[in-house]
Image: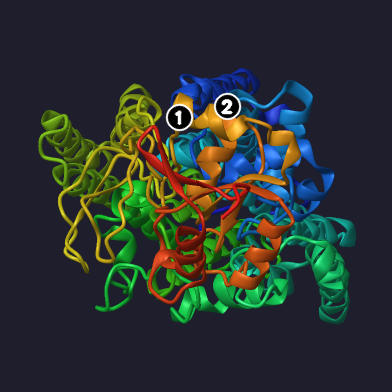
Amino acid sequence: MSAIPYPALAPSTPARDLPVARASRPAWARPSFIVLLLATLFLYVVGLDRNGWANAYYAAAVQAGTQSWKAFFFGSLDASNFITVDKSPAFLWVMEISARLFGLNTWSVMVPQALEGVATVALVYLATRRWFGPAAGLIAGAVVALTPAAALMFRYNNPDALLTLLLTAGAYALLRAVEGGRTRWLVLAAALVGTGFLAKMMQAFVIVPVFVLVYLLFGPPRLLQRIKQLVLAGIALVVASGWWVAVVELWPSADRPYIGGSQNNSLLNLIFGYNGFGRLTGNETGSVGGLGAIGSRWGLTGWNRLFLPEFGGQISWLIPAAILLLVACFWFTRLAPRSDMVRASLVLWGGWLLLTGAVFSFAQGIIHPYYSIALAPPIGALIGIGATTLWKHRSALLARLVLAGALAATAAWSYVLLDRSPTWNPSLKVAILVLGLLGAALIATSPAGWKRLSIVVAALGLLVALAGPAAYTLETVSTAYSGAIPSAGPAVAASSGPGGFARGQGGFRGVPPGGFTAGANPPRGGGGGGFLNASRPGSQLVAALQANAGNYRWVVATVNANSAAGYQLATGDPVMAIGGFNGSDPTPTLAEFEAYVNAGEIHYFIGGGGGMGSGSGSTGSEIAAWVSQHFAATIVDGVTIYDLTAVP
C-alpha cells in the first residue's frame, strides 16, 4: 500500500516548509481552542481548596521561602535553613513567588500548579495543530486534560506539574528546530529540559536521548552542522541545569542548609544517588524501603507495570491505542523523505512515550503512580496525530481497520480498568464496551463518503475513548487529597504485587509492609501523623509552640519532615525536621543537637514522628533518648512534648 500524503499539505510540498496554513484553518479552530483552555482551567481550579495544603512537606517549604530568601534559593524546609527538601527547588520557586505576591494560602500555592496544567494542554495543542491541524490539537489537548494523573498533579503541589510543562515546552521547541533547522530553537529546547532538571532532577533527562535522536535524524542541515548544533544545545543543557548545582556545591556547607535526601550533605550525592541511578537500581541509601522484595521493593517491575492496578487507572487508558496508531502512521509515512515533519513528530512523541514508559516499568527504586503524568503529553499527541491522520484517509481499508482496532482496544481496556472498581459506576464499563464495539464496527464498514454518518461515528469514537479517563478525572477533582503519595480515581481491587494492598483515593488503603500508613484523609488529632502524612496539632499545642517563638531559631524539633511540616504550617514558625523527609538523613548528630539546645536555639522537642529515623540506632532515636533522659515530659493535646529550655 502506498504511503499516505502529508496531512493537510500538498503531496509535492515539503512538510517542513508549510505548517498548516492559517488560511486553511476553519473558523471554529480558535474558539474551540479557547473553550478547551477555559474548560481545563475550570476543571483544575474548581474546588481546589478542598485539598488544603495537599503535600504539607512542600507547602511548608513554600512557607519558608516566603519568609527567607535564603530558604527560597536553597529550597529549605524551614526559614531557619536547617535542611532542604529532597528535590531541586525550581517547582517551589513558582509557588513561592505566588505566595509572596498574594499571601500564603492554599490558593496561592495550588493555583500556579493548575495554570501549569493549562499551559501544558495549550502547548500540546500547538505542537500538534501546527503540522496536523486544529482537530488533532483539540483531541491531543483534551486527552492530556482528562488524564487522571494529570488532573491529580495539576491540582497538587508536587514537582511533577512544572516538570511536565517544561518537557512539553521543550518538545514544542524541538519540533520548531526540526522544522526550520534554527539553532536558537534547539538551544531553547535544551534550556527548557535543563530547567526541568531544577524541578525534579534526573527524571528530566530521561527524554534527552529522544531529543538528540530526533534532531540528528530529521534536522534539515547537513550532518556535520546538525552535530555542531547539538553540541551547542548540550552546552545550554548543562548551563541551564548546572548553574544552581554549581552555586550550591561552591557554597560553604557550614553556611547553608543540609542537603535533604543525601547521606553526606552533598548535592551530587542527592542527584546521582537518591534522585538518580538509585531510582533505577533500587540501591537508595536512606530510602523508605518500598513494598517488598519480589521484583522490586516498590512493586512488580516489567513491561506491564503501567497496566497493573497501581498505575493502570492513572495513565494507561489510551496507551494501547497510542501505540497502535504510532505503528500505523510509521507504516504510512515509510516513503517520506528523511526530513519529513510527520515522521519527526511520531519519533519524538513515540520515543518519549516508549522510553519514559520503559524507565517507569523497570525502575526498581522509589516510584509512585503519579509520576506517570509525564506520559500524558506524548499519549495525547499520538492520539491526536494518529486519529486525525488515519481518519482523513479512511477511504483506505487499512486506515479504517487500524482506527477500528484502536477504538475496540480502548473500549475493552477501559472495561478492564473500570472493572477493578466493581461498585463504582458499574454501568459505565458496559456502556463503554458496547458503544466502543459498535463504533469500531461502523468505522470498519461505513463508506467514507457518508459525511453525516462519519460525523456521528467520529463523535461516538471520541466519546468512548475519553469516557473512562474523564470519569476517573471527575472523581479525582471532586475528592480531597493530602499526603505524600496521592492516587487518582476511585479505590481499586487489591494489587497482586508485593504486599497485596489496595490503592485508592489519595494513596494506600491499609498498611503496607514496613508499617507506615498513607492516604487522602489521615486521622485528625494531635499526633505526629505518620511520616507520610503531616502532623495536625490541636489549638492548645499550637498556642504552646507559638509562645515566645521569636526567642528561638526553631520553636520545636521533631523526627521526619512531614511531622515537622504540620507543626510549621500550624504555627507559622520554623521547625527542625530531624533526619529530613524519611527521618533517615544523618543530621543533626546528637552532639550537634546538644549544641543547639545548649545555645537556647530550640524551644521544644516532640518525639513519635515515625519514619526510618525513629528506629533503634538512628540519629532520631538517639536524640529522642537523650531528650527523655534529661528533660521532663508534658502532655498537650495528647502529644508528649519536652521543653528544652527548662533546667534539667
Give SS at disc 1: helix
Residue 326 sits in quarter: bottom left
Classify 10 Å Cα crowding around label 1: few (below 14), some (14-19), many (20 and above).
Answer: many
Q: Amino acid at mark 2?
A: Thr
Residue at point 28% right, 78% down? 295
Residue at point 71% right, 71% down? 267
Where does label 2 land, which residue?
106
Report x, y in % for residue 400: 33, 48
Q: Amino acid at mark 1?
A: Asn
Answer whether labels 2 and 1 touch (C-beta < 8 Å).
yes
Label 2 vs label 1: CA separation?
A: 8 Å
Q: Which mark is residue 51?
A: 1
Report x, y in % for residue 522: 33, 39
Residue 598 appears in the picture as rendered: yes
Residue at point 20% right, 35% down? 432
Residue at point 44% right, 53% down? 607
Classify 10 Å Cα crowding around label 2: few (below 14), some (14-19), many (20 and above).
Answer: some
Q: How many marks?
A: 2
